[in-house]
């Protein structure tokens, strides 16, 4: 098992366990791999807007032998997910305004997940305000 960064470690701990994890902007798929390897979830749908990061993710998934557990999808935000498909969704490593826009663009996906784990790199107060104004509950 590969060691993940302290940031991804914290996200993994915050997710806890789930049946299906959605990882928006997966980049290298190290978080999904760790979630599967540790038995924290049984299936992951990892997505990214660009082909390059998905190729890197695919390489890691194959390296860890997780092709049957991690599904890759090309597309932006939550547009590649279906309602209730994932019980937990991670949107991390991007700005708070972009995260808010992703939630705005696909409320039918965001609102059917049991948990959203959001980790903005910038504009944290703006994202918090957006979440409160749109009926989301901030737990941590």
Image (cartoon, grey):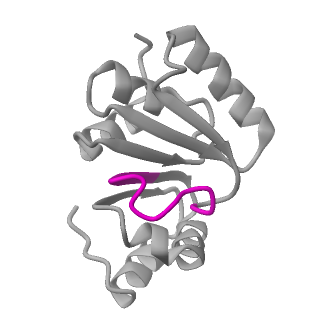
Q: Residue at x 50, y 27 (%)?
A: 30
Residue 5, image x and y in percent?
Answer: 44, 28
Quick check: 51 above or below 125? Answer: above
The reply, left or right, for residue 110 in relation to residue 13 is: right
Q: Is residue 7 above or below residue 81?
A: above
The magenta segment is 78-90
Horizontal and vertical percent position of residue 74: 71, 46
Q: Is residue 58 magenta?
A: no
**On screen, residue 61 above or below 124:** above
| Viewport quadrant of the N terminus | top left
**Residue 110 placement (x, y as % from top left):** 43, 68
In the rendered image, which quarter is residue 117 located in? bottom left
- Given residues 4 and 85, the one toward you in this image is 85
Report the magenta stretch's main SS: loop
Name the side, left or right, on which 61 lies relative to 40. Answer: right
Task: Pick the quarter of the image with the C terminus.
Answer: bottom left
62 relative position to 21: left or right: right
């Amino acid at each position: 098992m590969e060691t993940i960064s302290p940031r991804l470690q914290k996200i993994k701990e915050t997710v806890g366990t789930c049946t299906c994890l959605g990882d928006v902007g997966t980049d290298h798929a190290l978080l999904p791999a760790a979630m599967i390897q540790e038995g924290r979830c049984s299936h992951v749908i990892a997505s990214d807007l660009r082909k390059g990061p998905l190729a890197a993710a695919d390489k890691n998934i194959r390296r860890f032998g997780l092709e049957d557990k991690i599904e890759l999808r090309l597309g932006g935000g939550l547009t590649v997910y279906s309602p209730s498909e994932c019980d937990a969704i991670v949107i991390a490593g991007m700005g708070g305004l972009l995260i808010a826009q992703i939630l705005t663009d696909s409320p039918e996906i965001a609102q059917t997940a049991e948990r959203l784990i959001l980790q903005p790199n910038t504009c944290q107060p703006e994202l918090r305000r957006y979440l409160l104004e749109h009926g989301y509950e901030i737990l941590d």
